[in-house]
Image (spheres, helix red, strand yellow):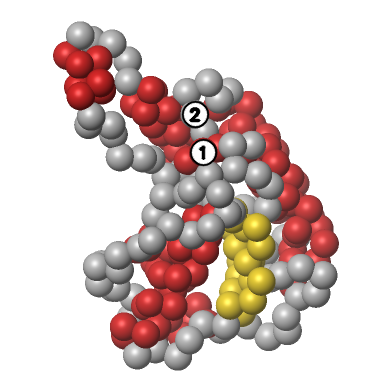
């Protein structure tokens, strides 16, 4: 019987949760204010450093990696080995990361993730995860189709790489518009585009939480 594992207790994932920031439309990182404190203890950090993790992302991923570096510096922990994959994969425990797909095209992210796993990461990593950007899911996105494609891909990956632990992430929301135009639209009972976009993102997030806990 197929078994989908969704272990979420590693220090790496706590670090990701602490430092996720908004994706930009371009590939550059966004400026970040590292004001949060980390609740990641040294035993959890060392446990994460002993694993090989493959992380598929786009622009927001660079901010997350910056967050990991900040945790190591702020807490005095040994740095995590972070390697950008490409033609070759590093040996030994490390956080491998690769930019996959295009922002605004969630199907390309799913395909990029599975392609990277098939290229070698799936057989060699202990843990793998991919992250959608908020640009990928907007009010006109067919959320059910995206989730169906994601679920089918994860099912296939689980069967193909039974020793790989998959971690599932939700889509980041954006801060609601508070300018005068948005205020007037809300006052008149009219929809605000960013509210509609966030609703679509949260619809997908609910599906992910319900399916993968």
The dot on residue 167 is: none
Residue 98 image position (x, y, % from top left): 66, 62
* Crowdedness near tag 1: few (<14), some (14–19) or many (≥20) residues, C-alpha within 10 Å: many
Disc 2 on helix, strand or loop?
Answer: loop
Relative to residue 6, is residue 11 depicted above or below? below
Residue drawn at x 72%, y 50% as measured from the top left: 112
Residue 23 image position (x, y, % from top left): 47, 49
Disc 1 on helix, strand or loop?
Answer: helix
Relative to residue 75, is residue 4 depicted above or below? above
The residue carrying mark 1 is 135
Residue drawn at x 75%, y 58% as measured from the top left: 116
Residue nearest the viewer, comparing 171 with 152: 171
Residue 171 image position (x, y, % from top left): 46, 43
Would residue 185 be found to the left or right of residue 25 on screen? left
Residue nearest the viewer, comparing 99 with 206: 99
Relative to residue 18, is residue 25 depicted above or below? above
Q: Quadrant of residue 89?
A: bottom right
Residue drawn at x 82%, y 62% as measured from the top left: 119
The residue carrying mark 2 is 138
Residue extending furthest left? 187
CA gap between label 2 and label 1 equals 7 Å
Would residue 49 be found to the left or right of residue 184 on screen? right
Residue drawn at x 46%, y 64% as measured from the top left: 64
Q: Please give the count of numbered marks on the rendered protein.
A: 2
- Is residue 52 shown to the viewer in this render? no
- Is residue 180 shown to the viewer in this render? yes
* Crowdedness near tag 2: few (<14), some (14–19) or many (≥20) residues, C-alpha within 10 Å: some
Is the C-beta separation of discs 2 and 1 under 8 Å?
Answer: yes
Residue 152 image position (x, y, % from top left): 70, 38
């Amino acid at each position: 019987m197929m078994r989908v594992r969704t272990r979420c207790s590693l220090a790496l994932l706590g670090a990701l949760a602490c430092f996720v920031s908004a994706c930009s439309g371009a590939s550059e990182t966004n400026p970040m204010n590292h004001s949060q404190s980390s609740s990641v203890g040294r035993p959890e950090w060392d446990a994460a450093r002993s694993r090989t993790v493959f992380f598929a992302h786009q622009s927001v991923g660079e901010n997350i990696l910056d967050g990991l570096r900040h945790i190591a510096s702020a807490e005095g922990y040994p740095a995590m080995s972070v390697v950008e994959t490409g033609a070759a994969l590093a040996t030994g425990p490390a956080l491998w990361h690769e930019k996959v797909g295009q922002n605004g095209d969630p199907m390309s992210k799913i395909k990029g993730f599975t392609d990277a796993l098939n290229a070698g990461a799936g057989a060699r990593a202990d843990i793998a995860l991919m992250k959608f950007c908020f640009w990928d899911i907007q009010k006109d996105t067919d959320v059910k189709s995206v989730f169906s494609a994601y679920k089918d891909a994860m099912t296939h990956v689980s069967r193909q790489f039974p020793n790989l632990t998959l971690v599932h992430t939700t889509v980041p929301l954006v801060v609601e518009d508070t300018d005068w135009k948005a205020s007037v639209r809300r006052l008149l009972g009219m929809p605000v585009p960013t509210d509609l976009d966030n609703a679509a993102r949260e619809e997908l997030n609910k599906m992910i939480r319900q399916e993968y806990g």
